[in-house]
Amino acid sequence: VSQSRYSGQASHPTRVRSLARKITLKNAAPSVVNRMKTLACILLLFCLQLHPAVASQREVACLTVAIYKEARGESEKGQYAVAQVIMNRARHFYYPPSVCKVVKQKHQFSWYKGATPEFRKLIKGDLRGFKSKDISAYQKAKQIALRAFYGLADPIPALENSLWFTTKNIRPGWSRKLKVVARIGNHVFYAKR
Protein backbone atom coordinates (compact mmCIF):
# COMPACT_ATOMS: atom_id res chain seq x y z
CA VAL A 1 0.00 0.00 0.00
CA SER A 2 1.48 3.31 -0.99
CA GLN A 3 1.59 6.20 1.43
CA SER A 4 0.34 9.67 0.55
CA ARG A 5 1.83 12.99 1.70
CA TYR A 6 -0.17 12.59 4.88
CA SER A 7 1.83 9.88 6.65
CA GLY A 8 -1.07 8.33 8.57
CA GLN A 9 -3.24 7.89 5.49
CA ALA A 10 -2.95 4.90 3.18
CA SER A 11 -4.08 5.66 -0.35
CA HIS A 12 -6.93 3.38 -1.45
CA PRO A 13 -6.18 0.08 0.30
CA THR A 14 -8.15 -1.99 -2.22
CA ARG A 15 -7.39 -5.26 -0.49
CA VAL A 16 -8.93 -4.07 2.76
CA ARG A 17 -11.92 -2.52 0.97
CA SER A 18 -12.64 -5.73 -0.97
CA LEU A 19 -12.53 -7.77 2.24
CA ALA A 20 -14.91 -5.32 3.90
CA ARG A 21 -17.42 -5.74 1.08
CA LYS A 22 -17.47 -9.52 1.56
CA ILE A 23 -18.74 -9.27 5.12
CA THR A 24 -22.50 -9.76 5.21
CA LEU A 25 -24.94 -10.80 7.90
CA LYS A 26 -28.26 -12.26 6.85
CA ASN A 27 -31.30 -10.64 8.47
CA ALA A 28 -29.12 -8.04 10.22
CA ALA A 29 -29.92 -4.36 10.30
CA PRO A 30 -27.78 -2.27 7.89
CA SER A 31 -26.24 -0.36 10.82
CA VAL A 32 -25.05 -3.65 12.38
CA VAL A 33 -23.53 -4.75 9.08
CA ASN A 34 -21.75 -1.38 8.71
CA ARG A 35 -20.40 -1.64 12.25
CA MET A 36 -19.15 -5.17 11.60
CA LYS A 37 -17.47 -4.10 8.35
CA THR A 38 -15.85 -1.12 10.04
CA LEU A 39 -14.61 -3.25 12.93
CA ALA A 40 -13.24 -5.93 10.59
CA CYS A 41 -11.40 -3.33 8.54
CA ILE A 42 -9.92 -1.66 11.60
CA LEU A 43 -8.74 -5.01 12.96
CA LEU A 44 -7.21 -5.91 9.62
CA LEU A 45 -5.42 -2.57 9.39
CA PHE A 46 -4.18 -2.93 12.95
CA CYS A 47 -2.86 -6.42 12.25
CA LEU A 48 -1.11 -5.22 9.12
CA GLN A 49 0.34 -2.32 11.13
CA LEU A 50 -0.27 0.21 8.37
CA HIS A 51 -0.85 3.16 10.69
CA PRO A 52 0.68 4.43 13.93
CA ALA A 53 -2.13 3.79 16.41
CA VAL A 54 -1.89 6.83 18.67
CA ALA A 55 -1.58 9.43 15.92
CA SER A 56 -4.36 7.78 13.95
CA GLN A 57 -6.73 7.74 16.91
CA ARG A 58 -6.27 11.46 17.42
CA GLU A 59 -6.77 12.20 13.72
CA VAL A 60 -9.91 10.04 13.58
CA ALA A 61 -11.20 11.83 16.70
CA CYS A 62 -10.72 15.23 15.02
CA LEU A 63 -12.44 14.01 11.86
CA THR A 64 -15.29 12.58 13.95
CA VAL A 65 -15.85 15.91 15.71
CA ALA A 66 -15.76 17.78 12.40
CA ILE A 67 -18.35 15.47 10.84
CA TYR A 68 -20.50 15.62 13.98
CA LYS A 69 -20.39 19.41 14.24
CA GLU A 70 -20.61 20.16 10.51
CA ALA A 71 -22.92 17.47 9.16
CA ARG A 72 -24.64 15.47 11.90
CA GLY A 73 -28.08 16.10 10.36
CA GLU A 74 -26.96 14.98 6.91
CA SER A 75 -27.39 11.65 5.19
CA GLU A 76 -24.52 9.17 5.29
CA LYS A 77 -23.43 10.39 1.84
CA GLY A 78 -23.49 13.99 3.04
CA GLN A 79 -21.32 13.12 6.03
CA TYR A 80 -18.87 11.19 3.83
CA ALA A 81 -18.71 14.21 1.52
CA VAL A 82 -17.67 16.49 4.39
CA ALA A 83 -15.11 13.91 5.53
CA GLN A 84 -13.73 13.57 2.00
CA VAL A 85 -13.16 17.32 1.67
CA ILE A 86 -11.37 17.42 5.04
CA MET A 87 -9.18 14.49 3.98
CA ASN A 88 -8.51 16.24 0.64
CA ARG A 89 -7.30 19.26 2.58
CA ALA A 90 -5.00 17.18 4.78
CA ARG A 91 -3.35 15.83 1.61
CA HIS A 92 -3.16 19.18 -0.20
CA PHE A 93 0.03 21.27 -0.07
CA TYR A 94 -1.84 24.47 0.79
CA TYR A 95 -3.32 23.08 4.02
CA PRO A 96 -1.64 21.60 7.10
CA PRO A 97 -0.68 17.92 6.70
CA SER A 98 -2.93 16.65 9.48
CA VAL A 99 -6.69 16.28 9.94
CA CYS A 100 -6.51 17.88 13.39
CA LYS A 101 -4.57 20.86 12.08
CA VAL A 102 -7.02 21.28 9.19
CA VAL A 103 -9.98 21.17 11.59
CA LYS A 104 -8.34 23.62 14.01
CA GLN A 105 -7.17 26.06 11.34
CA LYS A 106 -8.49 29.58 11.98
CA HIS A 107 -11.57 30.74 10.11
CA GLN A 108 -12.18 27.39 8.42
CA PHE A 109 -15.14 26.06 10.41
CA SER A 110 -17.65 28.36 12.04
CA TRP A 111 -18.21 25.96 14.94
CA TYR A 112 -14.51 25.76 15.94
CA LYS A 113 -13.78 28.42 18.56
CA GLY A 114 -10.57 26.95 19.94
CA ALA A 115 -10.10 24.10 22.38
CA THR A 116 -13.30 24.73 24.30
CA PRO A 117 -14.37 22.29 27.04
CA GLU A 118 -17.00 20.85 24.68
CA PHE A 119 -14.41 20.31 21.92
CA ARG A 120 -12.00 18.61 24.33
CA LYS A 121 -14.81 16.34 25.59
CA LEU A 122 -15.78 15.38 22.05
CA ILE A 123 -12.17 14.67 21.06
CA LYS A 124 -11.93 12.28 24.02
CA GLY A 125 -15.29 10.73 23.11
CA ASP A 126 -16.71 11.80 26.48
CA LEU A 127 -20.44 12.06 25.80
CA ARG A 128 -21.67 12.36 29.39
CA GLY A 129 -24.50 14.85 29.56
CA PHE A 130 -25.34 14.53 25.86
CA LYS A 131 -28.85 13.64 24.70
CA SER A 132 -29.31 10.15 23.27
CA LYS A 133 -29.90 11.52 19.73
CA ASP A 134 -26.60 13.43 19.96
CA ILE A 135 -24.78 10.32 21.19
CA SER A 136 -26.20 8.36 18.27
CA ALA A 137 -25.16 11.10 15.82
CA TYR A 138 -21.63 11.14 17.30
CA GLN A 139 -21.32 7.35 17.00
CA LYS A 140 -22.46 7.49 13.36
CA ALA A 141 -19.95 10.27 12.69
CA LYS A 142 -17.21 8.15 14.25
CA GLN A 143 -18.00 5.17 12.02
CA ILE A 144 -17.91 7.42 8.96
CA ALA A 145 -14.68 9.06 10.13
CA LEU A 146 -12.99 5.68 10.59
CA ARG A 147 -13.98 4.50 7.14
CA ALA A 148 -13.05 7.81 5.48
CA PHE A 149 -9.72 8.14 7.30
CA TYR A 150 -8.56 4.63 6.44
CA GLY A 151 -9.76 4.84 2.83
CA LEU A 152 -12.47 2.21 3.28
CA ALA A 153 -15.27 4.32 1.84
CA ASP A 154 -15.57 4.71 -1.90
CA PRO A 155 -14.67 8.33 -2.70
CA ILE A 156 -17.33 10.51 -4.29
CA PRO A 157 -15.87 11.17 -7.77
CA ALA A 158 -17.26 14.72 -8.03
CA LEU A 159 -15.35 15.66 -4.86
CA GLU A 160 -11.97 14.33 -5.95
CA ASN A 161 -10.49 17.85 -6.12
CA SER A 162 -12.86 19.64 -3.78
CA LEU A 163 -11.28 21.60 -0.95
CA TRP A 164 -14.22 23.78 0.13
CA PHE A 165 -17.84 23.52 1.11
CA THR A 166 -20.54 25.75 2.55
CA THR A 167 -24.10 25.23 3.63
CA LYS A 168 -26.53 25.86 0.80
CA ASN A 169 -28.00 28.91 2.55
CA ILE A 170 -24.87 31.05 2.24
CA ARG A 171 -22.71 32.17 -0.67
CA PRO A 172 -19.48 33.78 0.59
CA GLY A 173 -17.48 36.06 -1.68
CA TRP A 174 -14.62 33.58 -2.03
CA SER A 175 -16.98 30.96 -3.52
CA ARG A 176 -17.58 33.07 -6.65
CA LYS A 177 -14.01 32.32 -7.79
CA LEU A 178 -14.67 28.57 -7.60
CA LYS A 179 -16.86 26.13 -9.46
CA VAL A 180 -19.65 24.17 -7.81
CA VAL A 181 -18.86 20.46 -8.19
CA ALA A 182 -21.67 18.96 -6.09
CA ARG A 183 -24.69 19.67 -3.96
CA ILE A 184 -25.22 17.01 -1.34
CA GLY A 185 -27.81 17.48 1.36
CA ASN A 186 -27.41 20.87 2.99
CA HIS A 187 -23.91 21.48 1.59
CA VAL A 188 -22.47 22.88 -1.63
CA PHE A 189 -18.98 21.66 -2.58
CA TYR A 190 -16.44 23.66 -4.57
CA ALA A 191 -13.20 23.13 -6.48
CA LYS A 192 -10.88 25.42 -8.43
CA ARG A 193 -12.07 26.38 -11.91
Image (tube, grey):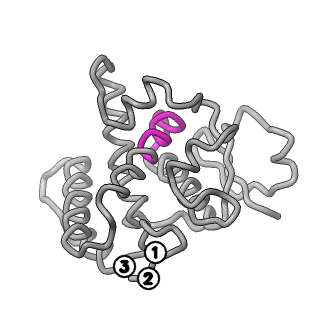
Up-down relation of residue 160 to residue 165 (above or below): below
First of labels 3, 2 by sequence position = 2
The residue carrying mark 2 is 2
Circle 3 packing at 10 Å, graded few (<14), some (14-19), many (20+), is few
Circle 1 packing at 10 Å, graded few (<14), some (14-19), many (20+), is some
The residue carrying mark 3 is 14
Up-down relation of residue 187 to residue 44 (above or below): above
The number of callouts visible is 3
Which element type, helix, strand or loop, lies under badge 1?
A: loop
| Magenta-span inclusion, residue 65 | yes
Query: In percent of the image, x 36 and y 79: which residue is there?
Result: 14
Query: In percent of the image, x 31 and y 35: which residue is there?
Result: 125
Distance between mark 1 and mark 3 Cα atoms: 9 Å
The residue carrying mark 1 is 11
- Nearer to us in this view, 94 or 35: 94
Quadrant for the N terminus in the image: bottom left
Magenta segment main secondary structure: helix
Magenta span covers which residues?
Answer: 63-75
Find residue 90 and report its horizontal and vertical position in percent. 57, 59
- Circles 1 and 2, Cβ within 8 Å, touching? The answer is yes
